[in-house]
Amino acid sequence: MTQVSRITDEQTPTSTSSTILLRISKFNPEHDDSGRFMEFTIPYEKWTTVLEAILDVKKHFDHSVAVRYSCRQATCGSCGMIINGKPRLACFTKISELNSNVVTVEPMNNFPIIRDLAVKFERLFNTHQKIKPYLIRDDSELESDEKEFLQSPEEVEQYIQFANCIKCGLCNSACPTMATDSSFVGPQALAQAYRYVADSRDKGKDSRLKIIDDSHGIWRCHFAGSCSQVCPKGVDPAMGIQLLRGYLLGFRG
Amino acid sequence: MRESTIMKIHYGTALAAVALVAVHILMRLTQGFAESLEYDSVLANYKFIPYAAMLELILILLAVHGFNGLRVILLELKQGRTYEKAVSYGCLAAMVALIAYGSRTIIMTNMGMT
Amino acid sequence: MTQDEHKEGIKGMVNPSRYGIERFAYWLMRLTGLGLLAYFIGHIYETSNILRGQVGWNEFLELTQTTEGHAILAIVIAMCVFHTVNGVRVMLGHGGIGVGKPARPDYPYEPASQNYRHKIGIYSAIVLAAIAMMYGLAVMFGE
């Protein structure tokens, strides 16, 4: 059962800013049987992000709140969490955009919890590695002074969108198949498989298609599109997966 | 069998079934719904070999598509080597059993064994 | 919560409220698929009564040709039409058709795969299913 503890800040200057009720999920798998929510009243400005509010809590109320973050500009992919029911980057989500006086933050679904809002990424990194996220070819531009792998702007356009992936895991958290299937490769890895297959410099298409043509591979994607709706970098994994499947169905060469 | 082959069969059976089921439903509507369900009318349908063959084809297509769909849903719900094997072979067995049971009706009625 | 994979589970998988009409279509596709399979098995059993001769067939018709039976059949018609139309949409999408072209993403990063073509496809499937159900009801209860 979820318990609730409430702390209201009477010391923090509120000045002209409004306040929200920030509900933070607290759970330590090593000690706790069930999760609980800690509630904090936090002042915010128009530009305050959810991450800043959480860090405010850590600074003024409860330093034990576990949260992973680094760049604070949607580049490192560390601060993914469920914010008001949907997976989002805490540093990329402004409180004012949520249109709610209550902001609830929970750890991402489909990732094992380390503590509170911090989750383990081993599975995501393993599936990412599984699809061979590097150029596969016999020769290498590093071995020769004369050769470099030229690409036209049109060829770059084929994959550059998918190269924007920051491995934040929001897509895997939103995916309905990931919600129940522990063996599914996941939208992140599948979109990355397309990123390399679509790269004109890469020659590893067949080996990658073989890896994902599995009972828990690409066919377990049903084009629900939730992954693309939550992607903070415009990667659109659903598009990549369908284009990749086009190769297996014979629609693409 | 590779998963891509299974899923190609899944899509193929779906498309073929849509066309044949449409004919099957149109037959009910052109004859008048209640009249088409009368014993003599149904019997005549079964005894008309092209129609009986179409029913057999629909039976196979929908059984393959339906039970593969069920297999997909069940595989996504729970994982594990034993469970997954049980689901795959269970769905295959159910599919064969349903086709056998449906074929029995079609063949026996077609041959006048009612 | 336990120390496991923290999977969202069936509840999260079937929750259609957070990710728009596409997630709703995904959920409805599963539900109609299971419903149609159940009906198909029942239909095979139902039609096997022809082997019991005219008396057996008529006995079974009396059971199924009722108001409840017609209502169930109307729902089956709706499920069948939705599953077919949405299935064609999903199949085209699976082949990479109508999912947009890769391009450099620009803020606010609207996903091209979640485009109006697919939304229209989903709404069409729902509307056509409703129309087919009403037509089916008119045919069954009109006689």
Image (cartoon, coloured by chain):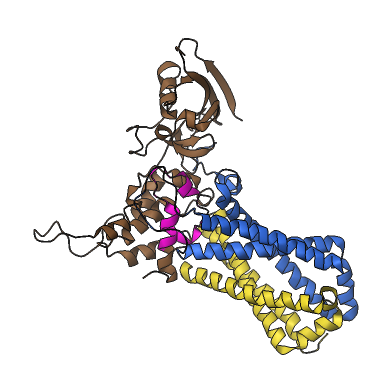
Chain colours: A brown, B yellow, C blue
Looking at the rendering, in which quadrant would you find the C terminus of chain A? bottom left
Residue drawn at point x = 67 percent, y = 82 percent: B54
Residue A191 in view here: yes
Residue A249 sits in quarter? bottom left
All told, the count of numbered labels is 0
Q: Tell me the residue at 44%/12% (across/down).
A: A13
- How far across and how far down the image is residue B47, in percent? 77, 88
Considering only vertical position in the picture, is A174 above or below C125?
above
Q: Is residue A234 magenta?
A: yes
Can you give x and y, in whole percent of width and height, for residue C64 in the image? 84, 67
- Quarter of the image for the N terminus of chain A: give it: top right
Q: Residue at x 29, y 64 (%)?
A: A204
Instruction: Give the residue furthest to the top.
Output: A11
| Relative depth, front residue between B65 and C26 | C26
Q: Position of residue A110 (x, y in %)?
A: 49, 44
Q: Which one is in front, C117 or A68?
A: C117
Q: Is residue A250 left or right of residue A138?
A: right
Within the magenta stretch, is there residue A178?
no
A172 above or below B3?
Answer: above
Question: Which range of residues does the magenta coloring cover?
Answer: A218-244
Using the image, determine if residue A190 lies above or below residue A77: below
User: For the point 75% across and 79% down, which residue is it?
Assistant: B27
Residue B58 x/y as whole percent: 66, 77
Does C26 sit left or right of C135 as displayed? left
For the residue pair B75 and A74, the one nearer the viewer reads as A74
> Which image quarter: residue A243?
bottom left
